[in-house]
Image (spheres, rainbow, N blue to C red):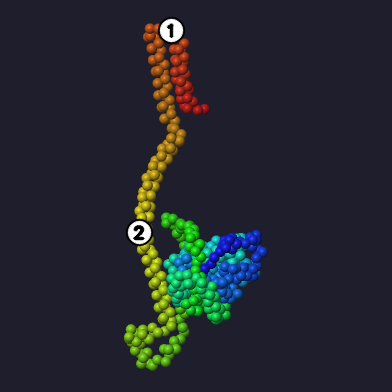
Amino acid sequence: MFSWSKTNKPGKSNGNRSSMSNYTRQQHIASYLTDPTLKPSTRKINDTTFDTVFQTKESNALILRVHMPSSLIISCPKMSLVGIRAVHPWIDSKMKVVGYPSIQSDKAFVSSGILLAQAVNHVVHHLQINPPTQLVFMDAALKSLQVSIRGSVTGGASNASNATSSNASIHNAGASHKTNGNQPPPYGSQFQSGTNAVPPSLPSQQHQQQPPAYKLPPHFRAIITLTENDYRQQIATLQNLELPKTPSTFPSQDALERTKLTLMRDDPATHLVPNLMPLPIVQETADLQHTMVESNSNLATYALEKKSELLEVHAEVKNLQSSLKEKMDQMNNLQRKQMELCKPMDTKKILHKLKKAKKESLEESEELAMEWLDGDDAGGKVNEFLDRFLEIRTVHHVRAAKMERIENPS
């Protein structure tokens, strides 16, 4: 739906990126509403909430809801995808955008030095090129819009000329919707303007871009613990489930006769259940149940598709673990041998070795003397004999001195 130029590329500021303290809340809002890329597809709901419509490369129309808190201190914007349930590395279970680093906290937003328009541009651009998976449309109007979009895509080039008028139809439909106070309208209500309300298609150059690689989750061997923050988040999730509110009265049941009520009490399957099925609360609960079943079915199908890949990875991990165990055993054996070689030798063992070596040097010198005396030329080569004899006897006396030093260290 968007086409970023070189001067307005998401994630890059146009000029001043110094201190975020120079930007007021009004400047953030103005940059968002006047941005040449976002303006045609953005609708103001109230003073703090805005909706931006965009189309992914898979031809799905999505709504990014942006909430900019009104406070004296600049707070980071809150972004979420409305009217759907999906899976994406940047989105949590409540469909809130949590993966974009610049809006993860007030400090991160301030230190990033970007305007609100640049943050929205970056998030929308990322979700266009890397659309969510396991997509389930919770809102009927938003779901019906997808059918009209796919119809327009198959229409070919004839629909390309209607992109501008289609975009105007979206915002005309959004402007005609009446809201109660500051509450945002129902999901998809801004699209209830006919089949022409189709977001412009994704630029062709965005189709050619390759999505960046996501960071892999922690290794499965890591121990996963439930922190206090995780526990509080689970409690908040359970408290904020979007379940239909149970009415305090049922006007359609108040006028029933006593005999009818008695039959409903005595035979619930025949009289009570058919009488309760048309109630709005029952219909809403049934629709929610159907949506959750469809979502769980998609997740189960996705898991089954990954079964063969998981088994291959599991077998590879088992082989690597076995190889690692062998190498660890080998390393432990070498470490034990190293410790044996590096630790000081026992004194008794040293004395035993020195005594044996001293005896060997003494015997070697005696044999050398006997060979020289028994030789035919005993009178010749005297100097050679003396040098060799003194060398061996010196070794003998050095070893004896070492033994004496060990036995009497003082």
- Amino acid at circle 1: Gly
Q: Where 357 sits versus 325, above or below?
A: above
Label 2: which secondary element: helix
Label 1: which secondary element: loop
Residue 61 vs residue 381, the one in the foreground: 61
Name the quadrant containing residue 348.
top left
Q: Quickly name the residue at label 2.
A: 308
Question: What's the residue at 36%, 55% (across, down)?
Answer: 312
Percent position of residue 11, x then y: 57, 61
Are discs 2 and 1 less than 8 Å apart at CB? no
Q: Where 370 sits versus 149, above or below?
A: above
Left or right? Give the position of 261 relative to 93.
left
Mark 2 or 1: the one toward you: 2
Residue 229 seen in this snapshot:
no
Residue 380, numbered label: 1
Name the quadrant containing residue 268.
bottom left
- Label 2, label 1: how many angstroms apart (C-alpha)? 90 Å
How many marks do you count on the picture?
2
Residue 87, numbered label: none
Residue 207 vs residue 115, the one in the foreground: 207
**Mark 2 or 1, nearer chain start:** 2
Name the quadrant containing residue 274.
bottom left
Percent position of residue 96, x then y: 51, 68
Question: What's the residue at 40%, 24% (across, down)?
Answer: 356
Crowding around mark 2 (Cα neighbors within 10 Å: few <14, some 14 to 19, many 20+) is few
Left or right? Give the position of 378 relative to 129.
left
Question: What's the residue at 43%, 6% (across, down)?
Answer: 379
